[in-house]
Image (cartoon, grey):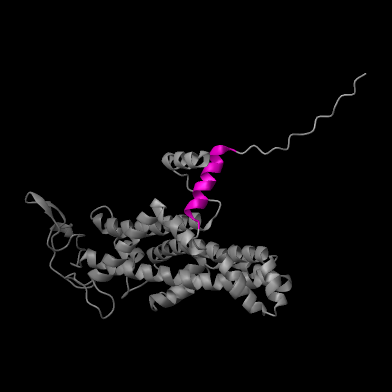
Amino acid sequence: MTTPVPQTPDTTVHHDPVQNTENAIELKEVEGLSQGRIVLRRFVRHRGAMVASFALLGIIVLVTTSIGWGPVPGWWQWGPNQLTPVVNPGGSPTMGMQDGGFQIGPHPFGQDNIGQDVFARVMRGTQISLMVMVVIGLVATSIGILMGAAAGFLRGRVDNILMRFTDMVITIPVIVIGAILGARFGQATPVVLAVALALVTWTSMARLVRGEFLSLREREFVDAARVAGASNVRIMFKHMLPNAVGVIIVNTTLLMASAILLETALSYLGFGIRFPNVSLGTLISEYQTAFNTRPWLFWWPGLFIVAIALCVNFIGDGLRDAFDPRQRRIPSQRKMNSAQRKAKA
């Protein structure tokens, strides 16, 4: 009677040649580059992020040079609060096809019922909205980093106290807290309002940073720094924070995109930027009664709001793909064929 021979499992790893070719191409392209250069290379190759970056840069250049910024004058002939004679009936835009050709005219975005140039007011509103967006992003990110880093690194009672406070802020709708703060600080400078709104928009950043620090806290380089005598503050901000910068940068862009929408909503409801300042949400709120008769008063503020929010979101997507090592760009067929020929040779 022949004893059956037990079949040993086949432990041979079968590699996919296409997968190996893609890995070889990717390693060859980043060979000798630093982590920063690798991230920049990936970001530049993200078409949507690059288009959004140039579009946002163009918007910034337009709004800062057209009507000027602070004491620096601009090239546009009208000011945001300057009264001028109404050119077209109802203040309709002068930009369009006229006399057999395309013309800009003195008021390309039109005029309101008292003769103010809409182009100048949209440029001023975009300036204020961009400034509020940047201030909210920076201040909320700073608060979120401090709260999340302390909670994730110290853990224990500190983590419980900070996270319960974060949960309490999250349970209250942001639009409600923002309306209360806007009613209190809306007549102050836009920077003061932005700082007040940042005090309620840091919660998502704090949770993300806490999760990263909980993971990084168990890494070997943290133990080595502790053995070397580094303080907790130095370990958190010198050793751990640079390893979490990818998540922080990506979510800062998403936070800024939501910040401009929050400011717009509050200004539209009358709790945001107020006279004599003006923002994109304020413009929509001021001209809401003329929606059916003069819709161009809404086109341009709404267009700039959507454009800025989309640009910042696309930039955030590009940064996320650039910082995430799991995101890989599929090489072209020509590069794959070339790599396969070199491997066979």
Q: Which residue is drawn at 6% across and 51% down?
A: 99
Furthest-right residue in this view: 1
Q: Determine whether 34 is above or below 47 in the image.
A: below
Residue 256 lies, in percent from the top left, at 45, 64
In this picture, residue 251 sits left or right of residue 237: left
Can residue 308 be seen at all in this image of the molecule?
yes
Residue 18 falls inside the magenta stretch? yes
Q: Nearer the viewer, residue 179 or 60?
A: 60
Q: Which of 220 and 111 is in front in this view?
A: 220
Residue 24 falls inside the magenta stretch? yes
Furthest-left residue in this view: 99
Q: Quadrant of residue 7?
A: top right
Residue 106 lies, in percent from the top left, at 14, 63
Residue 204 lies, in percent from the top left, at 56, 63
In this picture, residue 239 sits left or right of residue 175: right
Q: Please tell me whether the stretch drawn in magenta is mainly helix, strand or loop.
A: helix
Furthest-front residue in this view: 345
Can residue 172 be seen at all in this image of the molecule?
no
In this picture, residue 320 sits left or right of residue 152: left
Q: Nearer the viewer, residue 321 or 192?
A: 321
Residue 27 lies, in percent from the top left, at 52, 52
What residue range appears in magenta?
16-31
Q: Determine whether 269 is above or below 237 in the image.
A: above
Q: Residue at x 41, y 59 (%)?
A: 312
Q: In which quarter of the image is residue 303?
A: bottom left
Marker count (numbered): 0
Q: In which quarter of the image is residue 87?
A: bottom left
Q: Which residue is drawn at 70% across and 65% down?
A: 218
State which quarter of the image contains the N terminus.
top right
